Image (cartoon, helix red, strand yellow):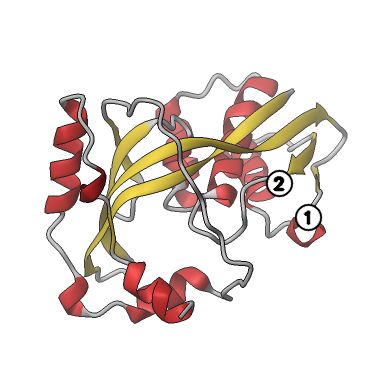
Amino acid sequence: MEVPAYAKLNLVLEVMAKRSDGYHEVRTVLQTIDLADRLTFHPAPSLSLRCDDTSLNGEDNLVWQAAASLANSRGIQPRVDITLEKHIPVAMGLGGGSSDAAAALLALNQLWGLDMSIEELSEIAASLGSDVPFFLTGGTATGTGRGESITPIQSLPSLPVTLICPSETIPDKTARMFSRLTADQYTDGGRTERLAGILEADGFVADMQYNVFELAAFQEFP
């Protein structure tokens, strides 16, 4: 079985506040794009993962964790050989690892004949990462909470996108980006609500795109 794992863009990304559990409350509009990794699954005696980027091999990969978590949830052994072909740039906010994990959950749900619902898969997905539940359905959606609470909305029409990905990588990127935020950069979620409303009315306003981490990104990449 071979499946794609699509990248995503945050058309709007707002941070509202830091929560008591250490996470941040976010509001976002998410959109999958055609750029995709490829995953191939074959029945095997045990769980194995091979990636063309060898630095992503092993149990730290979310694909491995997704397979192990799904099998554990049903009390079975994760008997599958997985090949991961990377096309989505790593650590660029495009959701590659999260999308790979969601693709693995969907594919193995079918391959192992588990017949689990999207709601059941979403519980496992949320334990793997905040973005993983979105990729179970993809398309256009709003995200609330940590980003894991997903509400599908009217899809955007097909549009061209240009991605510019710096060659430098930032260790612990997510933590460093959040650490740069100050209280005056917190917003009330209004931008997310307004863009979602426009999309539901079959519209799109490019000028309404917003990412709270833009300033932090320019500070990291002056």
Which residue is under mark 2? 86
Q: Residue at x 48, y 36 (%)?
A: 33
Q: Is residue 219 visible?
A: yes
Tell me if 208 is positioned left or right of 62 in this view: left
User: Picture quarter containing residue 217?
Assistant: bottom left
Q: Tally the numbered discs.
A: 2
Q: Residue at x 44, y 27 (%)?
A: 118
Residue placed under numbered mark 1 in the picture: 53
Farthest residue in the right direction?
A: 45
Q: Is residue 60 left or right of residue 189?
A: right
Left or right of 112? Residue 55 is: right
Amino acid type for the residue under numbered disc 1? Asp
Q: Residue at x 61, y 71 (%)?
A: 169
Residue 129 on image: x %, y %:
48, 53
In percent of width and height, residue 114 lies at 60, 22
Dot 1 alpha-carbon crowd within 10 angstroms: few under 14, some 14 to 19, many 20 or more: few
In this orientation, which residue lies closer to the viewer: 185 or 118? 185
User: Element type at marker 2?
Assistant: loop
| Amino acid, disc 2 | Lys
Looking at the figure, which quarter contains the N terminus?
top right
149 or 215, which lies in front? 215
- Circle 1/circle 2 CB separation < 8 Å: yes
Q: Residue at x 75, y 42 (%)?
A: 85
The one of 45 and 179 positioned closer to us in this rendering: 179
Q: Quadrant of residue 152?
A: top left
Q: Position of residue 183 (x, y in %)?
A: 19, 78
Among the two numbered marks 1 and 2 on one chain, the one whose residue lies closer to the N terminus: 1
Q: Secondary structure at mark 1?
A: loop
Name the one closer to the observer, 217 or 177: 217
Residue 153 — which label? none
